[in-house]
Image (spheres, helix red, strand yellow):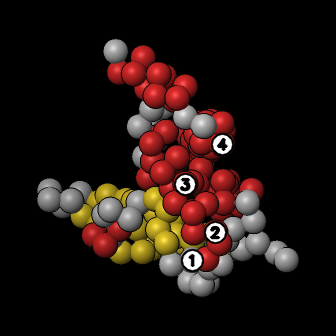
Amino acid sequence: MKVFKSIRIFLLLGINIKLLFLEAFFLLGWARILKSMPFSKIAPSLGEHMNETSLIIDESKKQQLKNISEAVNIMSRNTFWESMCLVKAIAAMKMLERRQIESTIYLGTAKDETGKLIAHAWLRSGPFYITGAEVMDQFVVVSKFAKKISS
């Protein structure tokens, strides 16, 4: 029943939002495939290692950032595959790159309550966090990748 309700809601949306959701869905799938590969193979495509993009962003892009964040987070809950933090960050980064918007992926680690090492990824563009901000404060940044857009 949840699938039918989701489809009905999707059909009521405007064309631009539908296209954004479809883009997010397909890029989440693409990012999931990338995640199954060795990280050393995909790392170069994530941007400049151990660099960050600017905290300043053109205010006119603020709504685009919000829309992309919402689309990726909503669609990640509606995929048939696992779409957790790294998958969401990579998909959102690609969506921003297509729109000529810079972003930085952060990779962090922490220990859970049992002492087991856990990892998290989140994406920032300008001063805004696109994915993964909910728990990022619990993690220590161990790597970052800046996707800069050349003028």
Estimate the x, y position of residue 89 in percent, counting from the top left.
53, 56
x 35%, y 21%: residue: 2
Q: Does any portion of residue 13 appear in the rendered image?
A: yes
Q: Which mark is residue 16?
A: 4
Residue 68 in the image: above or below residue 3: below
Q: Nearer the viewer, mark 1 or mark 3?
A: 3
Quarter occupied by residue 44? bottom right
Which corner quadrant holds the C terminus? bottom right
Question: Is the Cβ of the residue at disc 4 closer than 8 Å to that at disc 1?
Answer: no
- Mark 4 or 1, nearer chain start: 4
Q: Which residue is mark 2?
A: 61
Please indicate whether residue 77 sits to the left or right of residue 106 in the image. left
Gap in Å between the C-alphas at discs 4 and 1?
24 Å
Q: Which mark is residue 68?
A: none
Q: Nearer the viewer, mark 4 or mark 1?
A: 4
Estimate the x, y position of residue 34 in percent, counting from the top left.
62, 44
Which kind of residue does numbered mark 3 sit on? Asn
Q: Which mark is residue 67?
A: 3
Q: Secondary structure at mark 1?
A: loop
Question: Is the Cβ of the residue at disc 1 closer than 8 Å to that at disc 3?
Answer: no
x 39%, y 21%: residue: 5
Gap in Å between the C-alphas at discs 3 and 2?
10 Å
- Mark 2 or 4, nearer chain start: 4
Gap in Å between the C-alphas at discs 1 and 3?
15 Å
Label 3: how many residues lie within 10 Å, few (<14), some (14-19) or many (20+)?
Answer: some
Gap in Å between the C-alphas at discs 2 and 4?
16 Å
Label 1: how many residues lie within 10 Å, few (<14), some (14-19) or many (20+)?
Answer: many
Residue 41 in the image: above or below residue 126: above
